[in-house]
Image: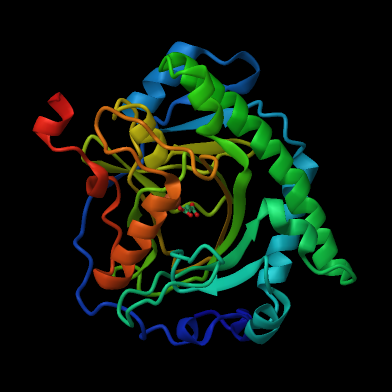
């Protein structure tokens, strides 16, 4: 590891590169570098292209989104500085409603890490910020107040984008207007700021293991290091970083609402042996208590889904996801 690294800022488990890793070497899979991810222009959104991207990919790039470049760079720089604080300061400073986590992206509803086995550590740390509770975060500390201000500004832009894009999807899918209002609620939005420490054992560790998001929509802003990969037609593809564009992921809730016409895309993050990677992700969910009606699944709320995921992660070590709610063939026909 390079000596310029600020090791004190790393959680102890990342300071020694040979702990927390599975001893089995990762299966070597070909990853395609040719980035054909669909690009949509927010200023002239084409509903047919949006529908195709949601069906074929479950993922697209959004350009012309109207978020000021300065806001994006200020938030990125500030997040980078905060993540470079010592491990101890991060634990002390980031208290409810914001939380600091490492080793896993799987958190409880209050933002605490779900327990992880010693051999499946994800090479990631970050802050979890529920947007509707941010006003309760640390009055009086100017550095944290500035972080809160930037998150709130950025969060408002992402809520605007998510609402408009979801409206277009609902129109494409002919979702009932009343229902679709409760299918996406701005008040549920949260932001994660991630740092993926550099890791010399690229063949054994993941920044983030393969997963689907549980959200309706996730909006990702990655830096220029790269490492995000998506599964498309059973092949892994690199999603190249392109400045000032955002990546939209469809999550499990969106797949269920669309009766499986749209895809909750499988993705993962590769570690990098030379550089740290930073990304900022926004996740948005259905309103609390909103029941998702689908011809493919039993009626369920997001909180039913979340409880099941938490239980599976605790007992099995992984998320089973939508399969848990699927109607069997005779139920679906009847
Ligand atoms: O950091 C990234 O590029 C992806 C993060 C992600 O997939 C997630 O938080 O669910
Ligand atoms: Fe994800």
Looking at the picture, tell me which residue is in the foreground, 29 or 45: 45
Question: Quarter holding the C terminus?
Answer: top left
In the image, is residue 62 above or below residue 18? above
> On the rendered structure, is 189 left or right of 203?
right
Task: Check the image and name the residue furthest to the left.
Answer: 330
Specify whether residue 288 is in view. yes
> On the rendered structure, is 156 left or right of 172?
right
Q: Residue at x 37, y 76 (%)?
A: 116
Q: Residue at x 90, y 71 (%)?
A: 140
Looking at the picture, tell me which residue is in the foreground, 62 or 145: 145
Q: Residue at x 39, y 35 (%)?
A: 292
Q: Residue at x 48, y 72 (%)?
A: 113
Looking at the picture, tell me which residue is in the foreground, 280 or 313: 313
In this rendering, the count of numbered labels is 0
In the image, is residue 265 above or below residue 271? above
The scheme the figure's colours follow is rainbow
Location of residue 148 (image quadrant): bottom right
Specify whether residue 40 is in view. no
Give the percent coordinates (x, y) of residue 162.
59, 33
In the image, is residue 240 above or below residue 138? above
> On the rendered structure, is 68 left or right of 226?
right
Give the percent coordinates (x, y) of residue 43.
65, 18
In the image, is residue 31 above or below residue 52? below
Give the percent coordinates (x, y) of residue 183.
50, 33
């Amino acid at each position: 590891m390079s000596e310029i690294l600020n090791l004190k800022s790393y959680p102890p488990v990342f300071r020694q590169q040979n702990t927390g890793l599975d001893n089995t070497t990762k299966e070597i899979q070909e990853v395609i570098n040719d980035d054909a991810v669909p690009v949509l222009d927010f200023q002239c959104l084409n509903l047919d292209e949006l529908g195709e991207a949601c069906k074929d990919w479950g993922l697209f790039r959004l350009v012309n989104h109207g978020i000021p470049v300065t806001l994006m760079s200020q938030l990125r720089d500030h997040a980078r500085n905060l993540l470079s604080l010592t491990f101890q300061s991060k634990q002390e400073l980031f208290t409810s409603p914001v939380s600091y986590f490492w080793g896993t992206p799987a958190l409880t509803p209050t933002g605490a890490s779900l327990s992880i086995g010693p051999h499946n550590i994800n090479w990631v740390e970050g802050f979890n910020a529920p947007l509707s509770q941010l006003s309760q975060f640390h009055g009086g500390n100017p550095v944290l107040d500035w972080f809160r201000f930037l998150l709130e500004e950025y969060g408002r832009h992402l809520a605007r984008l998510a609402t408009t894009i979801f409206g277009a999807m609902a129109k494409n899918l002919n979702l009932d207007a009343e229902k679709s209002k409760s299918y996406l609620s701005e008040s549920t939005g949260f932001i994660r700021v991630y740092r993926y420490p550099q890791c010399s054992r690229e063949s054994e560790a993941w920044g983030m293991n393969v997963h689907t998001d549980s959200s309706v929509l996730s909006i990702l802003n990655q830096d220029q290091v790269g490492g995000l990969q998506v599964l498309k037609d059973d092949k892994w593809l690199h999603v190249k970083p392109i400045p000032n564009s955002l990546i939209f992921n469809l999550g499990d809730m969106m797949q269920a609402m669309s009766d499986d016409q749209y895809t909750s895309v499988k993705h993962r993050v590769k570690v990098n042996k030379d550089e740290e990677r930073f990304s900022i992700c926004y996740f948005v969910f259905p309103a609390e208590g909103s029941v998702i009606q689908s011809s493919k699944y039993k009626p369920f709320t997001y909180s039913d889904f979340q409880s099941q995921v938490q239980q599976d992660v605790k007992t099995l070590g992984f998320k089973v996801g939508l399969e848990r709610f699927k109607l069997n063939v005779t139920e679906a026909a009847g």
